[in-house]
């Protein structure tokens, strides 16, 4: 099933059947940050950050999604609490490492949400789960990311000289102006930004087959001029299950500029999902 929705409605879904099952989670895991364990959650939502971002991108989501959803912000090596680790610059290596690091949390129904680079990582992990005949996500939420078979029409930027690289970051509108104009902060963030944009540039093109056996929801920004709607619609070919495309007001980082609306709609989808898992 395929649907395209212009999002403008409000929703206030509530789970009415709390899960009583308890679970044994690892006491610490470098791949998850800002997590508040909820042993009664009926669904876990793993949230994968975009290029240059860390788990803190989703820190506020922990308190703003449904109480029966266990929000798991994913932390990549080389940033925030893992700043001492080497960046992973190979997309296959990152997917393999993330899958191994997160596998202990797949002991109850779960879903993936990823934005931009994080969306592609969530997709790559989902494909591996299917290939290995393991438990699949109940839903795959892809946000701000073109379908894997469509090449990026823009040339790579990660090897540009510093001034030109920063100019490109301004166009993307994902790095605060206060950071771009602060030499000390840029010295700190530059290795992560270059590593992540290099990783994005090295993603292989992937055809739809084999089709995923999980539903997909695609989120996009109406004013995201680098990512036209047709490149989001192309995700439809990657699943044999339900497919839904939602367009939100905003540019590539609509998940920040329109966070309240995004979370309202996401809560509604998670509530419906939890009723079937």
Image: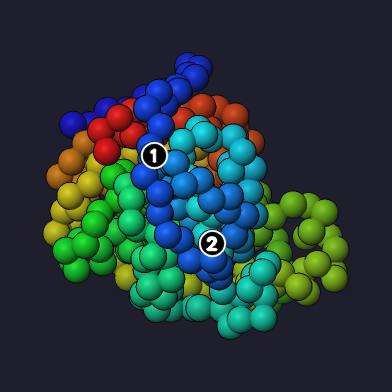
Image position, residue 118 (x, y; %): 47, 58
**Mark 2 or 1, nearer chain start:** 1
Q: Residues within 10 Å of mark 2 (few under 14, many from 20)?
A: many
Residue 5: image location, x then y, percent:
37, 25
Q: Is residue 43 visible to the viewer in this orientation of the structure?
A: yes
Q: Residue at the far top: name it.
A: 9
How crowded pointer 1 is (Cα within 10 Å; few <14, some 14-19, many 20+) is rated as: few
Q: Position of residue 210 (x, y in %)?
A: 14, 59
Quadrant holding the C terminus: top left
- Per the image, label 2 sits on a secondary structure element best described as loop
- In the shown orientation, is residue 194 left or right of residue 91? right
The dot on residue 32 is: 2
Q: Which image quadrant for residue 138?
A: top left
Give the residue displayed 38% in from the left and 73% down from the top.
100
Give x and y (percent) for residue 102: 42, 65
Question: Where the N terminus falls, by quadrant?
Answer: top left
Q: Mark 1 points at which residue?
A: 20
Name the secondary structure under disc 1.
loop
Q: Can residue 237 be seen in this snapshot?
A: no
Instruction: Give the residue drawn at x 85%, y 71%.
Output: 184
């Amino acid at each position: 099933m395929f649907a395209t929705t212009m999002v403008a409605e409000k929703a206030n879904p509530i789970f009415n059947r709390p899960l009583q099952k308890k679970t044994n989670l690892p006491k610490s895991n470098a791949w998850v940050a800002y997590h508040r364990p909820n042993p009664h959650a009926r669904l876990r939502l793993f949230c994968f950050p975009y290029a240059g971002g860390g788990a803190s991108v989703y820190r506020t989501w922990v308190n703003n999604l449904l109480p029966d959803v266990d929000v798991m912000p994913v932390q990549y090596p080389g940033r925030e609490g893992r700043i001492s680790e080497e960046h992973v610059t190979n997309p296959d290596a990152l997917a393999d490492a993330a899958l191994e690091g997160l596998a202990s949390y797949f002991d109850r129904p779960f879903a993936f949400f990823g934005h931009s680079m994080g969306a592609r990582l969530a997709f790559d992990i989902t494909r591996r789960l299917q290939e290995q005949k393991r438990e699949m996500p109940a839903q795959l939420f892809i946000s701000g990311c073109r379908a894997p078979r469509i090449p990026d029409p823009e040339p790579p930027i990660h090897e540009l000289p510093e001034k030109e690289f920063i100019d490109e970051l301004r166009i993307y509108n994902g790095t605060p102006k206060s950071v771009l104009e602060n030499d000390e902060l840029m010295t700190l963030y530059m290795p992560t930004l270059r590593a992540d944009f290099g990783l994005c540039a090295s993603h292989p093109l992937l055809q739809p087959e084999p089709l995923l056996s999980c539903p997909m929801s695609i989120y996009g920004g109406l004013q995201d001029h680098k990512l036209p709607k047709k490149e989001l619609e192309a995700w439809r070919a990657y699943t044999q299950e339900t497919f839904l495309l939602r367009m939100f007001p905003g540019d590539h980082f609509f998940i920040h500029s329109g966070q309240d609306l995004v979370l309202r709609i996401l809560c509604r989808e998670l509530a419906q999902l939890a009723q079937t898992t």
